[in-house]
Amino acid sequence: MRTEVVMPQMGESVAEGTVTTWLKEIGDFVERDEPLFEITTDKVDAEVPSPVAGVLVEKHVEPGQTVEINTIVAVVDTEAQEGEVPAAEPAQAAQSVGDEESNVVSLEEEKTTRQVAAAGGSASSVTADAGGFPSKAELRRTRSTPVVRRIAAEHGIDDLSPIPGSGLSGRVTKDDILEWIDQGKHLEKPAAPAAQQARKASTGGTTTREIHRPDIEVGERDKLEMLTPQRKMIAEHMVASKEISPHAHTVHEVDFSNVVAARKALKADFAERGVKLTYTAFLIKAAAEALREYPTVNASMDDESIVLRGDINVGMAVALDKSLIVPVIDNVDELSLLGVARKVNDIADRARNKRLKPDEVKGGTFTLSNHGVFGPEFGIPIINQPQAAIMSTGAIKKRVVVDQKTDAILVRPTSIWCLSFDHRIIDGATADKFMRRMREIIENWAI
């Protein structure tokens, strides 16, 4: 029996993934849940396990290729013997080839598309999908053959998207562009892109100004380092988040005296249970309680409505060597401190070892980024879409503070927090009340 292995969805906003490495070759036997290949997305680097035990008989995607979620990446035969590669049924083979041709988009092709758009194509030349990024069909459509591009350049056509295409996924062919020119449509003033019209309507007739990207001169001693697929997608999502959400920020200093004492008292007991107790566990537990009291912070914007999330699922930023990922701890408000600490240990360890499951990097309703482990005073984070807020925590350091009641000058372990929030959903007063509640929980933690 043949079992298809598809590209998993590693997060709710993730529409595609890139195969980076094959861990098995055609004819190799693979156990159930044994890693089959590695992928990268903007959310996570991960190993994809085989859903069954059997022999790898088909590989549909090469390293470096990007495919949509649910695209068939491999086929495992449960009845084959190691080293044996049975031929697929004709109908099945034909379908696999069709799927691969329609879904696989190489990184080089995508790079070419973005370069063309940046070089002079209008915003509509790479139409954005609901998440703000081009779909695979749209990427294929805006690409063209050298002949079509030459004809377009000769006639001053910078944007191919208005031309009805008869090729694969609406790709513009030579006949399509020649017919467009014969009809004189290339001389007509193009209409404003739909996204620009929508933005103009929503902002009372004004549009955001175009930002000129300065040319970069590469010197003899400079070194060029290509972005990894994950870093490139992170960059795209960060830019999109700033475009989607009007970011506002509030900063608070918090006394950690009680938490430091509580951690010292509980550390040995937790260690006996195989759990390392970190400050992150206290922060996530406090966030869950405050989120329950301030549901608008645990929300998302959906067009003209606000979705108040019923579950409290906290994303925890985990730093990797050259990137970061945000695994999610579900229903944190239902866990004890021990339960949260155990989850933090487990999910951080598996994140660094590429063992996360698809469900563990999606469904987050709020994100915590603990910058403090690297020593900074605080950080100003960018919202993890489609959430409404993200909080960063600075290093816990001994600082001089003034008692507001007695004016006594004291030395206390404190941390500086910054909440970045979507001002469409959350007002400044609500953000500060939420932060004040979190501060109260931390500063009054029972020892």
Image (spheres, helix red, strand yellow):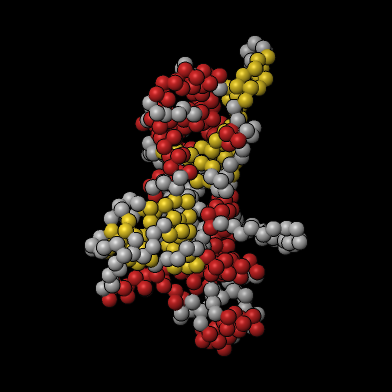
Q: Is residue 261 left or right of residue 221?
A: left
Of residues 180 and 148, the one nearer the viewer is 148
Residue drawn at the location 50% of the way across and 53% of the way down: 42
Q: Quadrant of the N terminus?
A: bottom left
- Across and down, in percent, residue 192 comes to 58, 68
- Residue 164: x percent and y percent? 49, 78
Left or right of 129: which side holds 380?
Answer: right
- The spot of residue 176 in percent (x, y) is 51, 84
Question: Which residue shows up at 42% across the image and 52% down it?
Answer: 47
Q: Is residue 130 above or below residue 152?
A: above
Residue lying at the far front of the rendered structure: 83
Residue furthest toward the bottom? 182
Looking at the image, residue 373 lies above or below residue 423: above
Q: Please give left or right for residue 302 compared with residue 377 in the image.
A: left
Seen in the picture, residue 385 relative to 403 is either above or below; the reply is below
Q: Nearer the viewer, residue 142 or 71?
A: 71
The location of residue 117, given as percent across then percent down, is 60, 68
Residues 402 and 361: in front is 361
Determine which quarter of the picture holds residue 233. Answer: bottom right
